Amino acid sequence: MKFVGGLPCLDFVNTTGGWKRGRILDDKLGTYLDLVRWAALAGIAVTPPARPMARDAAKVLARARALRFALHRMLQRLIEKRSPSQADLAVFRSELAIARKHHALILENGKLTWAFDDTRSLDAVLWHVSQSAADLVTSPALQRVRLCAGETCGWLFLDTTRNHSRHWCDMKDCGNLAKVRRFRDRQASGNGADSRS
């Protein structure tokens, strides 16, 4: 799993090998344990049971996948200055409502801070993702979210470049593939010898 999104909600949406026409290519969330592993790699502090009930874990995984689809479609439409669908908003709002029930002021080292109240809950990962997405869509940072220009990528990322000109999730991967493709196209059309870009 790679972390190029810049925010937990974007990296969560990117738990695929790519997106093509709304379909996932190579799902990285094959099991509930994959979701837990992703959270650990993302630095999300959750400690669900090591051996959760299979049925409960499957339900949370299904919710995670539904949230991922909804967030991808919703953010893509917002990037394109279009309104998200009511169905996607409903999925997002439902998960956010669950997360908000567990968001509490916690006294830690003599200071009050906002935190989630139960790190052992099976769906605690989704609380963090939902809150991250809510913070994003209600902030100016939303204007800097981009969709990778790779043909079969579709990953989302926060463009933090000074001139806001980033096109690729990762220049080493999708950016390099695009360069190679352009070079081959020029060679095929006979323009490769005098083109320097």
Image (spheres, rainbow, N blue to C red):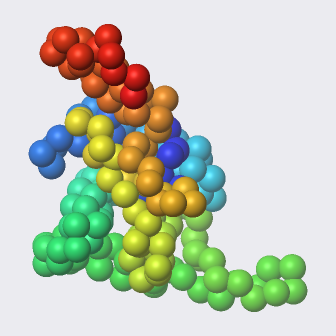
Residue 2 seen: yes
Q: 102 or 195, which lies in front?
A: 195
Q: Residue furthest right?
A: 110
Residue 66 seen: no
Give residue 133's quadrant in the image.
bottom left
The residue at 34%/21% (across/down) is 195
Q: 116 or 58, which lies in front?
A: 116
In this picture, is 56 found above or below 174? below
Q: Quadrant of the C terminus?
A: top left
Query: What is the x, y in percent for residue 175?
Result: 40, 33
Give residue 88's quadrant in the image.
bottom left
The residue at 17%/41% (across/down) is 20
Query: What is the x, y in percent for residue 23?
Result: 16, 43
Query: What is the x, y in percent for residue 56?
Result: 34, 55
The residue at 54%/82% (across/down) is 103
In this picture, is 67 found above or below 139? above
The residue at 50%/46% (across/down) is 4
**91 with respect to 86 (left or right):** right
Q: 27 or 152, which lies in front?
A: 152
Q: Residue furthest front?
A: 194
